[in-house]
Image: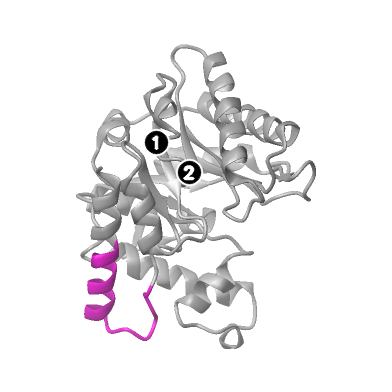
């Protein structure tokens, strides 16, 4: 594991840009970017369009390591290039931004109020490629709809099982058990998740760390003990459907918690903007998220 990257992730000031929309969430991301579904005919065209958006974003002058600590890439983005250079290499060498890759293959059906990850059948080969490409870590997402203790424990068990495999390859796992902001009792779900995470973290071997990516909490500083936990490198927050302004307001009240926003980061960016307009809007989004992340 790259020590310089590890130090940046442990104590750097800034946030993580999540640019890892998969097949399911890409049409929505493109629509928000001003590209309607009737402008592309198949997945290949769709993924080319979203790559152009991501390339424009990552190559923008306002997207740099002084505020953006890391970027979570979609697997295809890892295999592509930016300005003719491998994406991960470009991010680290040109921008000093740490590269991560999303490794999960989507969600299973809801059971016990949660959606576990589908079995990761491609994980070994994906981790091989990630190591070859100089990727620092991985991200995998599960989804919690209801405050169901059995469901939440199952999610945390599955996440940490895969995290162990990933850590053995020398990569830093981001564990992401997202709690729905529409949960019927989100504070209760948040509390059950924090308890389950604590129990698992306490079982980790002494030389092992993970990162946690969690929904912005309803109760301020709910994650303080997780942020301080010796087995945790960093705790980052997802925007989960809150607007950019709402996300940043909640984030700023949670000390030591930093952003890993996707939709909130790209809010107001469109394909129709000139490069100057695009860079200016992206720069202002980044400045707002950065300010909320360093509280």
The quadrant of the rendering that contains the N terminus is top left
Where residue 210 sits in the image (x, y, percent)?
Answer: 47, 29
Is any part of residue 200 visible from this angle?
yes
Where residue 46 sits in the image (x, y, percent)?
Answer: 56, 74
Where residue 269 sits in the image (x, y, percent)?
Answer: 36, 75
Q: How many marks?
A: 2
Q: What residue sits 23% from the left and 50% below the top?
A: 65
Q: Nearer the viewer, residue 23 or 16?
A: 16
Q: Nearer the viewer, residue 180 or 279?
A: 180
Q: Which mark is residue 217?
A: 2
Q: What residue sits 58% from the left and 73% below the top?
A: 27
Colour option used? one colour
Q: Which mark is residue 121?
A: none
Where is mark 1, residue-wise? 221
| C-alpha gap between disc 2 and disc 1 | 8 Å
Q: Nearer the viewer, residue 235 or 223?
A: 223
Where residue 278 sits in the image (x, y, percent)?
Answer: 29, 76
Mark 1 crowd level (few <14, some 14–19, many ≥20, 10 Å Cα): some
Give the extent of the magenta segment: 268-285
Residue sitting at the far top: 206
Marks 2 and 1 close (CB-CB < 8 Å)? yes
Main SS category, magenta section: helix
Picture layout, residue 251 above or below residue 277: above
The quadrant of the rendering that contains the C terminus is top left
Q: Quadrant of residue 22?
A: bottom right
Decide whether residue 217 is among the magenta residues.
no
Mark 1, secondary structure of its residue = loop
Picture layout, residue 176 above or below residue 106: above
On the picture, is 82 further left or further right than 183?
Answer: left
Mark 2 crowd level (few <14, some 14–19, many ≥20, 10 Å Cα): many
Q: What residue sits 50% from the left and 56% below the top?
A: 20
């Amino acid at each position: 594991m790259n020590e310089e990257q590890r130090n940046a992730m442990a104590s750097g000031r800034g946030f993580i840009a999540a640019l890892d929309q998969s097949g399911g969430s890409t049409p929505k991301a493109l629509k928000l970017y001003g590209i309607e579904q009737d402008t592309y005919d198949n997945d290949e065209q769709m993924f080319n369009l979203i790559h152009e958006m991501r390339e424009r974003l990552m190559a923008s002058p306002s997207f740099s390591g002084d505020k953006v600590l890391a970027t979570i890439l979609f697997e295809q983005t890892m295999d592509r290039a930016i300005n003719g250079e491998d994406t991960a290499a470009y991010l680290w060498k040109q921008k000093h931004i740490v590269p991560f890759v999303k490794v999960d293959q989507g969600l299973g059906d809801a059971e016990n109020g949660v959606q576990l990850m589908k079995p990761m059948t491609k994980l070994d080969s994906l981790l091989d490629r990630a190591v070859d490409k100089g990727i620092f870590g991985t991200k995998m997402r599960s989804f919690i709809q209801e405050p169901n203790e059995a469901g939440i424990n199952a999610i945390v068990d599955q996440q940490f099982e895969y995290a162990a495999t990933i850590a053995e390859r020398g990569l830093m796992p981001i564990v992401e058990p997202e709690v729905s902001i529409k949960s019927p009792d989100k504070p209760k779900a948040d509390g059950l998740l924090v308890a389950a995470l604590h129990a698992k973290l306490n079982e980790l071997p002494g030389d092992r760390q993970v990162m946690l990516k969690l929904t912005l909490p309803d109760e301020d500083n709910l994650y303080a003990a997780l942020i301080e936990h010796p087995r945790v490198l960093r705790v980052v927050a997802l925007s989960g459907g809150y607007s950019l302004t709402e996300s940043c307001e909640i984030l700023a009240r949670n000390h030591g918690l930093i952003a890993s926003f996707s939709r909130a980061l790209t809010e107001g960016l469109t394909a129709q903007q000139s490069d100057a307009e695009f860079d200016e809007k992206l720069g202002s989004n980044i400045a707002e998220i950065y300010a909320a992340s360093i509280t």
